Amino acid sequence: MKNIYEDERIVMTLDAGGTNFVFSALQRGEEIIQPITLPSNSDDLERCLKTIIKGFDQVKAQLNGQQPEAISFAFPGPADYKNGIIGDLVNLPAFRGGVALGPMLEEIFEIPTLINNDGDLFAYGEAVAGMLPFINESLAAAGISRTYKNLIGITLGTGFGGGIVVNNQICLGDNSAAGEIWLTRNYIKPKTVVEESVSIRAIQRVYAEQSGTTELISPREIYKIASGEKEGDKQAAINAFEEMATAVAESLANALALVDGPIVIGGGIAGASKFIVPKIIEHLSGCIYNLENEGMPRAISKVFNIDDPAQLNAFTADSEYEVKVPFSTAKAKYNKEKRIAIGISKLGTSTSVCLGAYALALDYLDKKNLYKELV
């Protein structure tokens, strides 16, 4: 697709929270208006919908006559994202039984409206303007022609979110249900979903259990204890992050077996990456066994933490060999070592989501225009 930072088309966006809605508009990958914040009125469907309409009306009023080409934003699920229908939401209780939010906005504003999951848009934003460009530019700078086109994006926060990019295209699935990594089996507590060990509440629970305290403190405070910046049970704090990392790693091992792409991590808990990423790599570098007790790598590819300069250098080092072509004097290139990068968001989670929404709208418009030309 085109470079989003050179695209003149305007897309209106929305950051939909349970308390407030924040409206904006992007052009050339940048906000071009002062964001507008309105209370979500999430307990009253009619007021909530009228708030969304009002917000986009106010955005248009700030565009000084320039016409937006699309609306694109993340909205909580469950939802039928492809058809723009929102299901029964927890944070927005007025949405029950299916609300045709996308079709409503298309009818009112007469422009395409795209609604997606924030995990999907996070992954796509990092693929378009964050992690994947960083990886491929680093390889090019090292004189390596290889490029990466796939990406697994995960977010660590209130819950465990995910998104998948395949061949530079967002993978939404046939039922708008791709990337739901939170539903994978929990390696720590196998009868539960992994999100029970990968969330704010999980960090709090493990620290409380191992430190013997009854007080639930924030992951930020637990991180300070783990780092030695605050008094508390340091080992319990480290264990809380490392247990979560182990659960994340096993889910990623399953995802990597299917997707085979770099991993980018976002969300508030990603700030504790110095405790999380090494443990993920340790687990992915371990073994899994068959019934004959023969070990094999948990992840086929070797995993490199590209936020560590030494590991980035190792990741970008040339691994190509030349092998002889049988019954010929010719030689062929052989990438003997399979390599996967893991790292923290290069843009920040909210920026990645916003740029993902913007880029997806531009991609949709390009394909729509191409279809019109073909027919």
Image: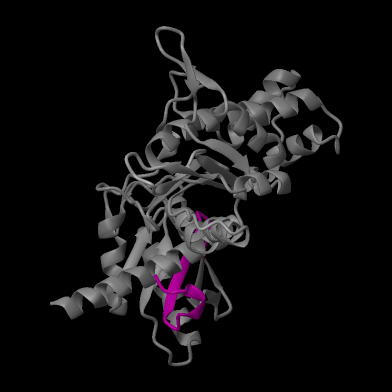
- In the orientation shown, which residue stands out farthest toward the left? 375
Instruction: Tell me residue 332's x, y (percent).
Output: 41, 47
Location of residue 290 (image quadrant): top left
As displayed, is residue 26 above or below residue 118?
Answer: below
Location of residue 9 (image quadrant): bottom left
Instruction: Tell me residue 22's x, y (percent).
Output: 52, 67
Residue 279 versus residue 71: which sits nearer the camera? 279
**Residue 346 placement, left or right of 296:** right
Identify the residue at image location x=46%, y=66%: 14
The N terminus, quarter of image: bottom left
The C terminus, quarter of image: bottom left
Identify the residue at image location x=42%, y=47%: 331
As displayed, is residue 197 above or below residue 103?
Answer: above
Identify the residue at image location x=49%, y=80%: 6
In this orientation, does residue 39 appear?
A: no
Residue 304 versus residue 183: which sits nearer the camera? 304
Q: Is residue 15 magenta?
A: yes
Instruction: Tell me residue 328's x, y (percent).
Output: 34, 45
Magenta part of the protein: which range?
1-21
